Amino acid sequence: MPQVRFTAHLLRHLPSADAEVAAGTLREALEAVFALHPAARSYVLDEHGALRKHVMVFVDGLRVSERRTLAQPLAPDSTVYVLQALTGG
């Protein structure tokens, strides 16, 4: 089953949000995590269900570019990393 991992910065706000989930797409994986940890949704998705501006997601080491439908297929052994992108300087 795909694994969803959150960076330490997000885990400060979402303890125990990492999960192994049954999912065929990125959207399904995230929805499975949100079912277990409802507070995670507002940190990751905006009010339209798209990735928030400062959230980046990587699937098997590749950055997800489609931020609205999140329809990227996942393999049974995929690893999804969710992190907060930092900007500024």
Image (spheres, rainbow, N blue to C red):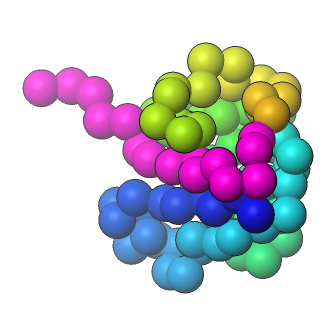
Residue 37 position within the rendered picture, expressed as x and y whole percent measured from the top left? 72, 75
Which residue is at the front of the view, 9 or 48?
9
User: At 34% across and 65% down in the image, what residue appears?
Assistant: 8
Residue 78 spot, x, y in % from top left = 65, 49
Quadrant where the image shows the C terminus: top left
Residue at 69% across / 70% down in the picture?
A: 20
Residue pictured at 50% horizontal, 28% vertical: 62
Magenta-colored span? 74-89
Left or right: 43 in relation to 45: left
Residue at the farthest top position:
65
13 left or right, relative to 24: left
Which quadrant would the N terminus be assigned to in this image?
bottom right
Labels in figure, total: 0
**Residue 73 locus on image (x, y percent):** 80, 34
Foreground pick, 4 / 76: 76
- Give the dominant element type of the magenta stretch: helix, strand or loop: loop
At a point 84% along the width and 71% down the height, the residue shown is: 35
Taking the view exactly as shown, the residue that stands out farthest to the bottom is: 16
